[in-house]
Amino acid sequence: MIRTENLGKYYTSHSHHEVHAVRDVTITISKNSFVILKGPSGSGKTTLLNIIGTLDRPTEGRVRMCGEDITSFSDIALSRLRREKIGFIFQDFHLIPYLATWENVSYPLVPLGIDIRKRFERAKTLLEKVGLGDRLDHTPEELSGGQQQRVAIARALINNPEILIADEPTSNIDEETGEHIVEILTEQKSHGATILVATHDTRFERVADVIFRLKDGKLE
Ligand SMILES: Nc1ncnc2c1ncn2[C@@H]1O[C@H](COP(=O)(O)OP(=O)(O)OP(=O)(O)O)[C@@H](O)[C@H]1O
Ligand SMILES: [Mg+2]
């Protein structure tokens, strides 16, 4: 489903310090597998997820998705691929502050021309699934960190993505809710999705098919 080949990412900062965030990473992720990515803070997990999730471009190497080399795709082709195939749960949520939770969740459906009634119904179902059925009209600032994280999870599921990428999806969440998030992601896998999660949460190890570990940007 996904293959990275000698993937690398350099950042050059204003102080001209070069950071080699990801180095020579070659991994294969099979369709319908549950893959977790571990590694200490700063080891390159978010950078790698962003590149695989088409939100960022590598400085070296390539990414193949469903047989296609997407490294050479235009920005428009990448955003289309993202819209159609990928659900992304960000480490820092990326919710739109002035929109209600249901509007945040259903936002990815707007460019697909789906009418507002259907968008609302679908968002409501997903918010109920993550235990926020009573927060449909709240804005993100009226929610706790863990609740915002669950809104971000519901939004990532709205397109029934073939590929679900989650960056530390349980980091702001209590035990019980965390367990529920593990269940939700596992359920997506049972519906055929391919799941890639960066996490320190050992509960994911029970359900993972493959565990990759990064250290200083390199695969261990
Ligand atoms: N936009 C950026 N500009 C410069 N350096 C960056 C940028 N983003 C990340 N880095 C650097 O790249 C390295 C990897 O960062 P990354 O966010 O991928 O780590 P991480 O494994 O996700 O860490 P954490 O567990 O803390 O989320 C770090 O050294 C970080 O400082
Ligand atoms: Mg990170």
Image (cartoon, helix red, strand yellow):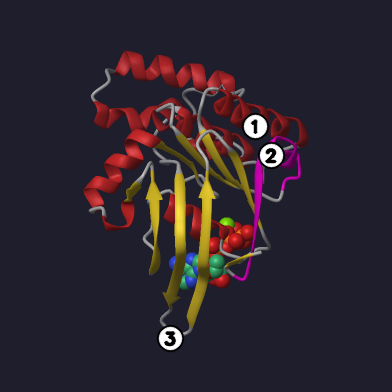
Q: Is residue 123 above or below residue 152?
A: above
Q: Residue furthest bottom?
A: 16
Which one is closest to the eye, mark 2 or mark 3? 3
* Residue 212 picture quarter: bottom right
Q: How many marks?
A: 3
- The segment highlighted magenta reads 201-216
Around disc 2, counting alpha carbons within 10 Å, would you say few (fewer than 14), some (14 to 19), or many (20 or more)?
Answer: some
Instruction: Give the residue drawn at x 25%, y 52%.
Output: 75
Asked if the residues shown at circle 2 and circle 1 are in contact, with their CB atoms under 8 angstroms apart, the answer is yes
Find numbered disc 3 in the image and state the secondary structure of the residue it sits on: loop
Disc sitting over residue 173 in the figure: 2
From mark 2 to mark 3, how far is it between C-alphas?
37 Å
Query: Which of pointers 3 and 1 lies earlier in the amino acid sequence?
Result: 3
Q: Is residue 185 above or below residue 63?
A: above
Query: Which of pointers 2 and 1 lies earlier in the amino acid sequence?
Result: 2
* Quadrant holding the C terminus: bottom right
Instruction: Give the residue drawn at x 46%, y 51%.
Output: 3
> x, y (%) of residue 149?
57, 39
From mark 3 to mark 1, how far is it between C-alphas?
40 Å
Q: Quadrant of ligand 1?
A: bottom right
Instruction: Give the residue drawn at x 27%, y 40%.
Output: 80
Q: Is residue 135 above or below residue 19?
A: above
Around disc 1, counting alpha carbons within 10 Å, would you say few (fewer than 14), some (14 to 19), or many (20 or more)?
Answer: many
Q: Which residue is mark 3?
A: 16
> x, y (%) of residue 41?
65, 63
* Residue 10 picture quarter: bottom left
* Residue 209 falls within the magenta-colored stretch: yes
